[in-house]
Image (cartoon, helix red, strand yellow):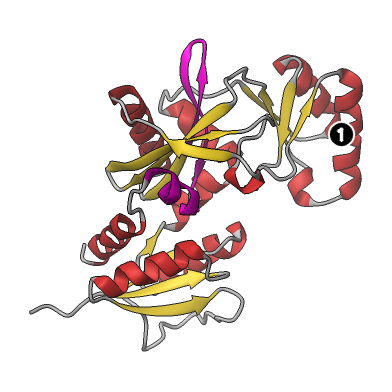
C-alpha cells in the first residue's frame, strides 16, 4: 500500500474554507500540516521535513507567490503554482492571458502615469471602472461617471504614493442584470456555479451580495474552462457577467473563497479540491 499524501496548508487565517479543507483531508485519511504564512521561514537549502504538496490559501498575493516559488525551489508542488497565482492575481496579466486565449472580456486600457490614466478613461468612455492591478473583494474599485470624478480619483490615487496605485487599470462599465456569475473550476471540471446579486454595481459576496445556485449549461462551462486554462489551470474561480452580447469574463481568482458557494448550491467544494491536491502530489 502506498504512503498517504501529506498536505501542507499554507494559510493566513483558518476560515470556514480552511476548516472544510482540513476536514475533507481527514475524511480521506490524509495527513495535514498547518503552515502560518506569518510565521514560516524559508532558507535556500531544502529542509529535511517537508509536505508532499502545499495547498496555498494565503490571502496575501505577495506571500502566496513567494511561498509557491520557494516550495518549487524545494521540489514541492503547490496548488496553485506561482505562475498561476501571478497571472490570475494580477488583473493586468490576467486580462492579457484572457485576450490571448480569445476569451471575451470587458474593454480594458492600462496607463502607467496619471496623465495617461485620464486618456485611458476617455478611451474607455463613461462610466468607467478603475481597479487596482492586485486586489480582491471589490476593494479600492471605483466607478467614475464624468471627467471631473476621474480627475479627482486619479489625483487621490497618485497622492497615496503606493506602488499599487501607480499603475492604472481601466475597464469599461458593463451594463448587466443585478447579478454576476461565479464558476468554481477544479482541474479540468466545473464543480459548481452561483449567481451573486446586489443592488450595488459590485456583486462580491464579501460585500453582502446574496447568492443562489446557477445552472451550468454548455456555454458557461466551456467559457469558464477556457478562462481557467488561460491562467494555467488549477483551483480557480471564474467571474462572469451576462451582457447583451453574451457572457464575458471579468476576473479569475486564484485563491478563491467558497463558503458562500457551498451554502448556495449544497455542493461539496472542499472535497474535489483535496482530491485534486492529492492528484498533483502524485504526478
Locate residue 123: give its quadrant: top right
Quarter of the image with the N terminus is bottom left
Most distant residue in the bottom direction:
48
* Residue for point 34% across, 35% down: 225
| Label 1 packing within 10 angstroms: few (<14), some (14-19), many (20+) | some
Q: Nearer the viewer, residue 69 or 130?
A: 130
Name the image quarter holding residue 63: bottom right
x and y, in percent, of residue 43 in the image: 52, 82
**Highlighted magenta segment, given as a residue range:** 239-265
Q: Is residue 146 left or right of residue 71?
A: right
Residue occupying the point 56% across, 39% down: 210
Q: Residue furthest top?
A: 244
Q: Residue 98's spot in the image, x, y percent?
A: 47, 31
Q: Position of residue 99 (x, y in %)?
A: 48, 26
Q: Report x, y in % for residue 9.
A: 43, 72
Task: Give the residue at mark 1.
Answer: 153
Question: Residue at horizontal 49%, vertical 80%?
Answer: 44
**Dot 1: element:** helix
Asked if residue 33 is positioned above or below residue 178 in the image, the reply reads below
Residue 190 among those drawn in magenta:
no
Residue 167: tell me if it is visible. yes
Determine whether 187 is above or below 46 in the image: above
Which quadrant of the rendered structure holds the C terminus?
Answer: bottom left
Q: Residue furthest left?
A: 1
Looking at the image, residue 135 lies above or below residue 55: above
Amino acid at each position: 500500500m502506498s504512503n498517504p499524501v501529506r498536505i501542507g496548508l499554507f494559510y493566513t487565517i483558518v476560515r470556514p474554507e480552511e476548516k472544510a479543507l482540513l476536514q475533507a483531508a481527514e475524511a480521506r485519511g490524509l495527513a495535514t500540516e498547518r503552515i502560518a504564512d506569518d510565521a514560516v521561514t524559508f532558507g535556500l537549502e531544502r529542509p529535511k521535513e517537508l509536505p508532499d504538496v502545499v495547498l496555498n490559501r494565503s490571502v496575501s498575493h505577495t506571500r502566496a507567490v513567494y511561498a509557491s516559488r520557494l516550495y518549487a525551489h524545494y521540489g514541492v508542488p503547490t496548488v496553485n503554482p506561482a505562475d498561476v497565482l501571478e497571472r490570475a492575481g494580477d488583473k493586468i496579466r490576467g486580462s492579457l492571458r484572457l485576450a490571448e486565449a480569445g476569451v471575451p472580456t470587458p474593454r480594458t486600457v492600462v496607463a502607467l502615469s496619471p496623465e495617461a490614466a485620464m486618456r485611458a478613461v476617455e478611451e474607455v468612455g463613461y462610466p468607467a471602472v478603475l481597479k487596482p492591478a492586485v486586489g480582491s473583494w471589490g476593494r479600492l474599485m471605483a466607478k467614475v461617471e464624468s471627467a471631473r470624478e476621474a480627475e479627482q480619483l486619479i489625483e487621490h490615487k497618485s497622492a497615496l504614493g503606493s506602488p499599487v496605485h501607480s499603475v492604472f487599470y481601466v475597464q469599461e462599465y458593463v451594463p448587466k442584470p443585478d447579478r454576476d456569475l461565479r464558476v468554481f473550476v477544479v482541474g479540468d471540471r466545473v464543480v459548481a456555479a452561483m449567481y451573486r446579486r446586489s443592488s450595488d454595481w459590485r456583486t462580491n459576496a464579501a460585500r453582502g451580495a446574496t447568492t443562489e445556485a446557477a445552472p451550468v449549461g454548455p456555454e458557461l462551462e466551456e467559457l469558464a474552462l477556457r478562462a481557467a486554462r488561460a491562467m494555467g489551470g488549477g483551483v480557480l474561480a471564474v467571474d462572469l457577467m451576462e451582457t447583451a452580447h453574451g457572457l464575458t469574463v471579468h476576473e479569475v481568482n486564484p485563491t478563491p473563497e467558497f463558503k458562500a458557494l457551498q451554502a448556495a448550491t449544497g455542493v461539496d467544494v472542499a472535497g474535489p479540491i483535496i482530491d485534486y491536491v492529492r492528484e498533483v502530489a502524485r504526478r
